Image (cartoon, helix red, strand yellow):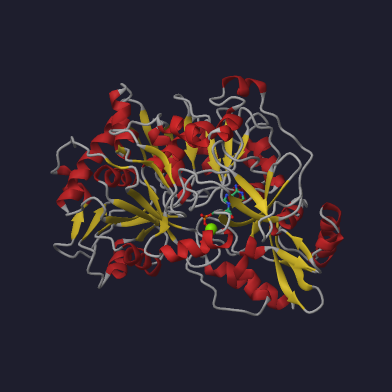
C-alpha cells in the first residue's frame, strides 16, 4: 500500500519540462477552456462551434462542428513546417533488418495507399481491418485510412483465425490488410492462410491486401479478391488531396484486451481523441524534437494507437518501432535497441519489467542506457518492487517513471504524473491528468476515506472517451454508465484507493477484489507484497470460495530461481512476509508454485481463469489467452497441490 518513498522530479528535468507547475490547477478551474487550448495545437480546417456537447449522455461530443484530417495533422503539417527530412520511424524487424523512414517518405506512402484504398472501393465510414505485425506498412495503413475517413481496426497479428474472424465480422470490414507471413520468436509463420480461413464466407470482405514480409512461397491466392500491396501502391500518384472530416467522425475501433471477458469494440472519433492523444503524449512523455521515443506495445493495442500512432505522429516525434518478441534472439534485445538508436524515452509494461528482473540487474548493466531520460509504464499496476528496479537498473536512478493509468475506453491517459512536476510514489499512477476528473467511491457514490478501496470513476466527460461499443450501444451504456447513471459517472471497472495526498492506487479489477471475513483486499496489493520477496518473480492472487471466511486467499507464484525442494518452506516465508507487509488478514492460506501464469496477448495476468480453477469452474472466455500451456501448467500445479 501507500509507500513512504517519494521521488520528486529531478531539478534538471523539471527545469526543461514541457509542462510546469499550476497546469493541473488551471485545467481543473476550467476544463473546457483547457481542452480548447490543447485542441488549438492541431490544424483544423473548420473551427469548432462548441467545445463540449453532452446533451446525448453518455455519448459526449467534443469540438462539434469542427473539421480536420488526422493524417494531415500527423504528416502534412510537419512537411509544411520544413520537417520532412526528420526521421519518423526507426523500424527494426525481428530478424534484424532495419528501415529508416522520414516524415516525407511516410507521407508519400500514405498518399499512395490512400489512392490505393479508394481504387479498392473503400469510402469514408467503411471499415478496414489490419492483421499485421509491427511494420512500417502497418503505420502507413492506419494513416491512409484516416486520410480518407475509413474506420480502421487493428487486430493483433498473433491472434487465431477465429479471433480475427470475430473482429472482421463484427466490424463488417470491406478490406482486410495482412502480410504473407510473419516472424515470431525467430520463426517465419504463415499468415495469409489464416486470413483466408477467417474471411471465408464473409461476403462483405471485398479485398485482401497483402504485404510481403516473409516471402512465403506457394501463397494461397484468390484472384480478383487478393491484391499485392506493392502492386497497388506502384500504380498510384504520390500526392493525395485530403478532405477534412467532422470532429465526431469515427477514426478507429479498438477491441479491449479481453482480460475480464469477451472483448468490446470501442469506437473512437477524430477531434477530441486526437486532442487528448496529442497533448498527453507531449505532456506526459515530455516530447522534445530531438527525442528518440520508443513505446514497445504492439500496434494493435490501444496503447500503441495513442502513444505510437496518433499521439507521437501528431507531435512529429522520432520513434523506434520494433517488430518482434522482446526476448528474441536474447533477453537483452530491448536494451540493445535502446543503445543502438539512443532511445531517450522508453514506455513499457510491468510484465516485461518483471521478466527482466528474473534475469537480474546484470542484464541491463550490459548495455549503454545513458541516453534514457524518461521511462513509462502501462497495462497493469506496476508493483513498487518492479518500479524501483526499472528506475534504478534501467533508468540509472535519473529518469522519472511515468505510470499511466488508462483503458481502451478512455482513449488516452487519465491518471498519470506530470514528469516535471509530480513527486512520484512507486506503484501509484499518481494524480488525474490535467483536464480529467476521477474519484474513488463506494457503491452508493460516496467518496471513500483515504486508504479505503472503492470503485474508480471518471466524473466528467473527457475528449478521448469512447463514444460507443461498435454495434452494441446498449452494452456501452450497461457496462460503463448504468451503475452511476444518477451521477452521470463513468465506471472504470477497476478498484482503487486514494491516499492522503490524493494519489490514486489501483487495486485490481473490481471482479478480482478479495473479500476475506468481511475485509476487502486488493489483488494488486497482495501481489506486490509477494513480488517484494526476493524469491518471487511474479504472482497472481485469487479468492477461492470458502465456507467460513467467504473467500480464502490463494497465491500462485513464479519463483526467480527454479522451483525447488523447499517450496513448502517458501509458502511459510511468504505468508509471514505478506503478514508484515499488508497485515495478518491478508496472509495467503495457500501458496502454489507455478512455472507460468495465464496472460492476455498484451501481457496482463488473467486472474479470472486462475480463480475459475480454484472454484472448480470452467468454460471462461480464453480467446485472448496468449499461451494455453500456461493455464495447463497452473492447473497441474493446482491439482498436485490439492
Ligand atoms: P477487458 O476490458 O476486455 O477485460 P482490459 O481491461 O485488460 O480488457 P485494456 O483496455 O487494454 O483491456 O486495459 C485497461 C485496463 O488495464 C485497466 O482497466 C486497468 O485494469 C489496467 N491498467 C492499465 N494501465 C494501468 C496502470 N498504469 N495501473 C494499473 N492498471 C492499469
Ligand atoms: Mg477493461
**Vertically, is 469 above or below 621?**
above
Residue 173 in which image quadrant: bottom left
Marker count (numbered): 0
Q: Is residue 108 left or right of residue 386?
A: left
Question: Is residue 59 at least partly visible in the picture?
Answer: yes
| Above-or-below relation of 457 to 476 | above
User: For this view, does 478 lie left or right of residue 232?
Assistant: right
Residue sitting nearer the eye, 459 or 252:
459
Vertically, is 92 above or below 55? Answer: above
Give residue 298's position: percent from left, percent from top.
Answer: 45, 50
Closer to the camera in the image, 630 or 38: 38
**Nearer-the-camera pick, 238 or 45:** 45
Indicate the position of residue 177 as horizontal and vertical percent values: 28, 55
Where's residue 421, x and y in %?
63, 28
Left/right placement of residue 606 relative to residue 293 reads right
The image quadrant where one finds the C terminus is bottom right
Q: Tell me what residue is drawn at x 20 percent, y 64 percent.
A: 221
Q: Residue at x 23, y 35 (%)?
A: 108
Q: Residue at x 50, y 63 (%)?
A: 258
Residue 285 visible in rendering: no
- Estimate the x, y position of residue 283 in percent, counting from the top left: 52, 31
**Residue, x 49% and y 44% (percent of image)?**
462
Amino acid at each position: 500500500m501507500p509507500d513512504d518513498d517519494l521521488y520528486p522530479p529531478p531539478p534538471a528535468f523539471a527545469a526543461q519540462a514541457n509542462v510546469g507547475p499550476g497546469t493541473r490547477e488551471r485545467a481543473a478551474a476550467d476544463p473546457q477552456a483547457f481542452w480548447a487550448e490543447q485542441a488549438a495545437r492541431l490544424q483544423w480546417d473548420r473551427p469548432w462551434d462548441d467545445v463540449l456537447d453532452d446533451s446525448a449522455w453518455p455519448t459526449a461530443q467534443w469540438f462539434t462542428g469542427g473539421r480536420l484530417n488526422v493524417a494531415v495533422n500527423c504528416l502534412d503539417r510537419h512537411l509544411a513546417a520544413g520537417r520532412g527530412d526528420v526521421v519518423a520511424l526507426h523500424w527494426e524487424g525481428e530478424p534484424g533488418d532495419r528501415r529508416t523512414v522520414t516524415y516525407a517518405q511516410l507521407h508519400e506512402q500514405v498518399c499512395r495507399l490512400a489512392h490505393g484504398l479508394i481504387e479498392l472501393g473503400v469510402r469514408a465510414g467503411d471499415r478496414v481491418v489490419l492483421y499485421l505485425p509491427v511494420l512500417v506498412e502497418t503505420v502507413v495503413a492506419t494513416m491512409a485510412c484516416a486520410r480518407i475517413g475509413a474506420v480502421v481496426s487493428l487486430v493483433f497479428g498473433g491472434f487465431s483465425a477465429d479471433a480475427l474472424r470475430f473482429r472482421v465480422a463484427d466490424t463488417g470490414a470491406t478490406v482486410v490488410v495482412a502480410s504473407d507471413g510473419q516472424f515470431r520468436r525467430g520463426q517465419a509463420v504463415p499468415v495469409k492462410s489464416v486470413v483466408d480461413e477467417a474471411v471465408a464466407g464473409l461476403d462483405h470482405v471485398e479485398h485482401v491486401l497483402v504485404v510481403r514480409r516473409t516471402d512465403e512461397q506457394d501463397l494461397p491466392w484468390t484472384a480478383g479478391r487478393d491484391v499485392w500491396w506493392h502492386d497497388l501502391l506502384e500504380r498510384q500518384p504520390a500526392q493525395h488531396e485530403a478532405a477534412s472530416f467532422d470532429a465526431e467522425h469515427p477514426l478507429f475501433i479498438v477491441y479491449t484486451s479481453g482480460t475480464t471477458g469477451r472483448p468490446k469494440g470501442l469506437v473512437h472519433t477524430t477531434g477530441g481523441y486526437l486532442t487528448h492523444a496529442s497533448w498527453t503524449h507531449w505532456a506526459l512523455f515530455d516530447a522534445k524534437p530531438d527525442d528518440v521515443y520508443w513505446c514497445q506495445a504492439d500496434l494493435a493495442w490501444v496503447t500503441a494507437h495513442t502513444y505510437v500512432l496518433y499521439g507521437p505522429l501528431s507531435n512529429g516525434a522520432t520513434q523506434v518501432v520494433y517488430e518482434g518478441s522482446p526476448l528474441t534472439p536474447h533477453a537483452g534485445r530491448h536494451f540493445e535497441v535502446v543503445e543502438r538508436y539512443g532511445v531517450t524515452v522508453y514506455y513499457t509494461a510491468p510484465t516485461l519489467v518483471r521478466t527482466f528482473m528474473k534475469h537480474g540487474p546484470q542484464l541491463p548493466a550490459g548495455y549503454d542506457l545513458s541516453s534514457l531520460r524518461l521511462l513509462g509504464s502501462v497495462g497493469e499496476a506496476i508493483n513498487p518492487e518492479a518500479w524501483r528496479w526499472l528506475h534504478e537498473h534501467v533508468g540509472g536512478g535519473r529518469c522519472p517513471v511515468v505510470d499511466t493509468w488508462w483503458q481502451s475506453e478512455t482513449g488516452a491517459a487519465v491518471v498519470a504524473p506530470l514528469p516535471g512536476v509530480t513527486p512520484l510514489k512507486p506503484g501509484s499512477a499518481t494524480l488525474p491528468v490535467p483536464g480529467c476528473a476521477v474519484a474513488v467511491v463506494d457503491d452508493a457514490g460516496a467518496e471513500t476515506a483515504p486508504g479505503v478501496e472503492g470503485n474508480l470513476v471518471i466524473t466528467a466527460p473527457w475528449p478521448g472517451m469512447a463514444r460507443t461499443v461498435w454495434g452494441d450501444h446498449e452494452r456501452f451504456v450497461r457496462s460503463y454508465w448504468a451503475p452511476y447513471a444518477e451521477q452521470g459517472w463513468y465506471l472504470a471497472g477497476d478498484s482503487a484507493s486514494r491516499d492522503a495526498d490524493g494519489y490514486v492506487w489501483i487495486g485490481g479489477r473490481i471482479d478480482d477484489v478479495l473479500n476475506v471475513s468481511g475485509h476487502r483486499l486488493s489483488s494488486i496489493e497482495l501481489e506486490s507484497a509477494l513480488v517484494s520477496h526476493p524469491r518471487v518473480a511474479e504472482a497472481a492472487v485469487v479468492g477461492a470460495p470458502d465456507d467460513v471466511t467467504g473467500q480464502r486467499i490463494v497465491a500462485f507464484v513464479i519463483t526467480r530461481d527454479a522451483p525447488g525442494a523447499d517450496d513448502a518452506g517458501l509458502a511459510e516465508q511468504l505468508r509471514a512476509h505478506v503478514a508484515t507487509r499488508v497485515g495478518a488478514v491478508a496472509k495467503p492460506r495457500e501458496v502454489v508454485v507455478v512455472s507460468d501464469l495465464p496472460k492476455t496477448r498484451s501481457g496482463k495476468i488473467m486472474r479470472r481463469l486462475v480463480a475459475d480453477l480454484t472454484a472448480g469452474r470452467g468454460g471462461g472466455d480464453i480467446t485472448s489467452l496468449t499461451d494455453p500451456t500456461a493455464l495447463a501448467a497452473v492447473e497441474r500445479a493446482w491439482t498436485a497441490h490439492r
